[in-house]
Image (cartoon, rainbow, N blue to C red):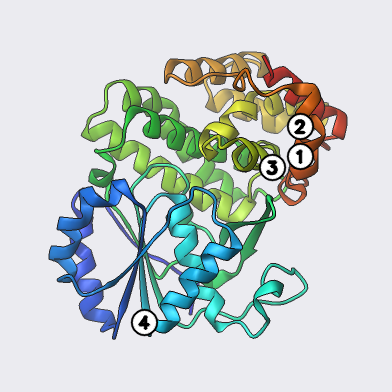
Amino acid sequence: MGNETNVYFGNGSIQRLSSIIVKEKPKKILLVRGNSSFKLFQPLLDKIIDNSYFDFQVRESTISLESSLKGVDYYIRKKCDLIIAIGGGSVIDMAKLISIFPSQKQKNKDLLDSQFRLSPRLNKLIAIPTTSGSGSESTHFAVIYKNNKKYSISHSSLIPDYAIIDPELTYTLSHYQTAISGMDAFCQSIESFWSKNATDESRLYSQKAIRLILNNIEYSVLDPNSSNRYAMSKGAHYAGKAINISKTTAAHAFSYPLTKLYGIPHGYAVALSISKFYRINGQDNSQSIIMNKLNSLLETETCLEAESKINSIITNIGLNTKLPENINYENEVERIIKYVNLDRLNNNPVEITVDDLKTVFKSLCQ
């Protein structure tokens, strides 16, 4: 498998699925999908692919090793050779894991061990996002958890062969889902810009994403229409292309325990701390050039203004900037620190200490 994706973008692009299947001539198709949201798309999908698929439902917002192995077992038993993922980031990540795990020689318990080099997948993979958030259709990694710890499976062949990005599939998103997925994409675009691994190419994608999302996220939540839905789909795709190169940083690293331990949706969990890490990065003089460029992209003069603007956007789209009241700082701080993802934390341009993490967590507790 190569790592170049054929991207079909635009309203009605879901119809391209039919010609892709004709081209690929699969023997058996595995459809990886979510729950309630999929019911809205099922009649359309059944018509396009003529009901001829096996169906694997993703029931969790964070993918565990155990659930992914159930998917792998189902895929093998049904002798599938093409996988279609339709849904949000978790659904697409699940499809990626099901696509690559069968071609590995190591035992199940060793799949997350970084000392083993993964072999390429041996099937075809089509990703159809139904949110404007994760950008997973553009990336070569998938998130998976084991014992509350987050791992990132990474391989060039995890990039899907085809990505169908049809903004019309996001029309049925609730205000809340639009808000949290939009903030995921917004945070990705900011983090990819300041990431240690950023390149000229990734920053070009980041800039495009920031401009599109900044100008449309509030409207897409409060007054959604075809124009701002289109812009958010495009912005999320660019943000995905950016993090595919740069990877995410401190805000994402900090978000994973919030999601796994407290069930806070991923995009919301990232949004909670992004302005805090913006302040930390902005206080380091060595980052002044990058942070000044970011301030300009956010149409602000200073990092303090940018921090305030980000928090205003979060509030305007109906999200809280604090953790739920039942989360107590003293009781939870050590557990949070334990599960912060070090890989993503180390991509941050400024070193984040344990004291920094404690300060961020304390500022989020009411």
User: What's the amino acid at mark 2?
Assistant: Gln
User: What's the amino acid at mark 4?
Assistant: Lys
The local secondary structure at tag 1 comes to: loop
Residue sitting nearer the eye, 216 or 325:
325
- The structure residue drawn at horizontal position 42% and vertical position 20%, both measured from the top left corner, is 317
For disc 4, the marked residue is 78
Q: Position of residue 147 (x, y in %)?
A: 69, 54
- The alpha-carbon separation of the residues under discs 3 and 2 comes to 20 Å
Question: Mark 2 touching mark 1, by CB under 8 A?
Answer: yes
Residue 27 falls in image quadrant: bottom left
User: What's the amino acid at mark 3?
Assistant: Ala
Query: Where residue 253 is drawn, which disc sits there?
Result: 3
For disc 2, the marked residue is 287
Task: Tell me the crowding category of disc 4: few under 14, some 14 to 19, or many 20 or more residues within 10 angstroms, Cα based.
Answer: some
User: What's the amino acid at mark 1?
Assistant: Pro
Q: Position of residue 186 (x, y in %)?
A: 50, 34
* Left or right: residue 356 compared with residue 156: right
- The alpha-carbon separation of the residues under discs 4 and 2 comes to 52 Å
- The structure residue drawn at horizontal position 78% and vertical position 26%, both measured from the top left corner, is 331
